[in-house]
Amino acid sequence: MVVPGIGTVGVVSTRHFHSQEDLILESGEKLGPITITYETYGQLGYKKENAILIEHAFTGDAHAAGLHTGDNKPGWWNNLIGPGKAFDTNKYFIICSNVLGGCRGSTGPSSIDPKSGKPYALNFPTITITDIVRAQKLLLDHLGIKTLLSVAGGSMGGMQALQWAVSYPDKVRSTIPIAAAAKNLPQQIAFNEVGRQAIMADPNWNDGNYYDRTRPEKGLSVARMIGHITYMSDKSMEEKFGRRFRETKQAFKFGGDFEVESYLQYRGNKFVKRFDANSYLYLTKAMDHFDLSGGRPLFEALKEIKAKFLVIAFKSDLLYPAYHSEEIVRACKLAGIETTYCEINSHFGHDAFLLETEEESRLIKHFLERVYTEDEENYEI
Amino acid sequence: MKYNTIRPDHEIILGQIEAGASVLDLGCGKGDLLQLLIKEKMVRAQGIEKAEEDIYSCVEKGLAVFHGDIDTGLSEYGDNNFDYVVLNQSFQQVTKPDLVLQEALRVGKKVIVGFPNFVYLPARLQFFFLGRTPLTPSLPYRWYDTPNLHFLSILDFTEYCSKRKIKVLRSYFIRKKKRINLFPNLLAETGLFVLTK
């Protein structure tokens, strides 16, 4: 259905920023030179006051909206980004970059280490959410953007959005963390650890050195299957699969009789074609070690923040249940941050941040309009 | 600007609050009151509302609002965090009104409470002559689908305030969209109180 006034950003292309300077990591180590892959949609205002940074989730990429030439699958948040949409490209300049440590164009463990001429593999330094944000800051400096109208993202993207507000309180005018958390609790760390163990148990993993040989596809696929369970909810699985059997009988006894098994195998097998096992290890570690509070009471970590917050959670989210978002909201109250919070009634589980775009739009669109039109004099633009 | 459609209780609340004050509206609904207060008094406004659909309406009005329960939502706020806390028509709907009001008085310098008077004359007549749970413009719900959990009178409330040593700064009584002063416990549909510790 075509809604009048609401359109698509059309055909887009991915760009690469090669940083001249090294990135100083939180650990003190230097990493460089680095490449950050990104896409932009819309036009940067002449005062550069309308830039919004979109943060992708764990295994996402810079392709958030529009179509690549010859492809028919739009970007992962296409329903939210475009002319007349919540992130309105008629008004705002949208940037989405692939995370540091990932494998979708930006520097990560599968990139070539200039020192050895071979992929970094496990020689890639340990990175944090803060480092991912610092790398994005280099990109924004390169684009000449001093202040962000907003930073928004779901799941690990929400963690980055939160970290932006804490790391650069003078440069962020609003923050939209969705289905996110201020830190991982034991349950999320446990899920991630099972994924990591599955990868490392695959003999093809070979201590991370597999780039010139068979990749640890089995292990990575199992990791993805576990991940996928946490992205759905009991209800959405029941609705999607029930106890239905798959159509073709499997030759092997334990080939998987149920549709849900077949689905997970399909998702796992599809995933290994686009994702690097070592990136899986590095990025899950970054999430597990993420703690926005920095060891203080959370509200103290938020005290310098000037940004307005829009916090969104989903009722059936198994991975980051709403109480994670409520913890952020409580800290915002204590820190005196102007905050809006909504728990959207959805049965799609954690994946809802990609699916419940109509409800998200209603919140994000008006929230952004308010931030955009309010007094800008407190900010260096 | 003069409003033709402004609710009488909103008009009274508007008259209480000075320009630039900070206001927390507990059970802010679709945010009409906060929107009015921002427009007329440039208040710093925050709402709390438990109905998801109302959250969207509030955000569309540009309001900051928390989706949550007011029975539990105040503990993070420090003492006297707000100039005003408003409990208008939500007071009789909370699980523990005593606790919520004590909390509201802690976090707000002043608290404005508005509720339907359960013993308004037509209600009494319906009780007495019809033998049924009354239905009035301020108590429009059937017994089986009412959001109201507590049924109190103006007299109940003033007695409660003196027992709890809550200071009543001002009180207003409304009947058929007009303010009245005579025999409020019998003739008023709605009572509105400005309170402080």
Image: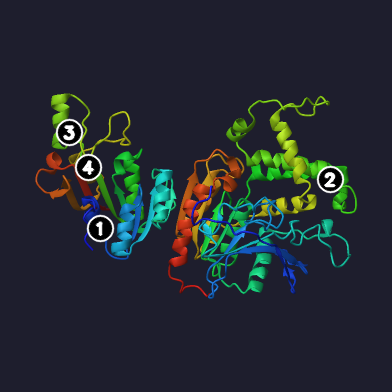
Residue A326 visible in rendering: no
Give the residue pinned by disc 4.
B157
Snapshot quadrant of residue B184: top left
Picture quarter containing residue B78?
bottom left
Residues at discs 4 and 3 in contact (Cβ within 8 Å): no
Q: Is the same chain shared between marks 4 and 2?
A: no
Q: Establish if B124 lies above or below A52.
A: above
Q: Secondary structure at mark 3?
A: helix
Q: Secondary structure at mark 4?
A: helix
- State the CA–CA distance, disc 4 to disc 2: 71 Å
Sequence-wise, which precedes: disc 4 or disc 3? Answer: 3
* Residue that mark 3 sits on: B123
Q: CA distance from mark 2 to mark 3?
A: 75 Å
Q: Nearer the viewer, mark 2 or mark 3?
A: 2
Amino acid type, callout 3: Ala
Q: Element at badge 2? A: loop
Q: From the viewer's perspective, is the residue at label 1 or at label 4 nearer? A: 1
Q: Chain of mark 2?
A: A
State the residue at coordinates (85%, 67%).
A114
Give the chain of mark 3.
B
Please report contact status of discs 1 and 4: CB closer than 8 Å, yes or no: no
The amino acid type found where label 1 is placed reads Leu
Residue drawn at (15%, 49%), measured in percent from left and top? B178
- The residue beneath circle 1 is B14
Q: Amino acid at mark 2?
A: Pro
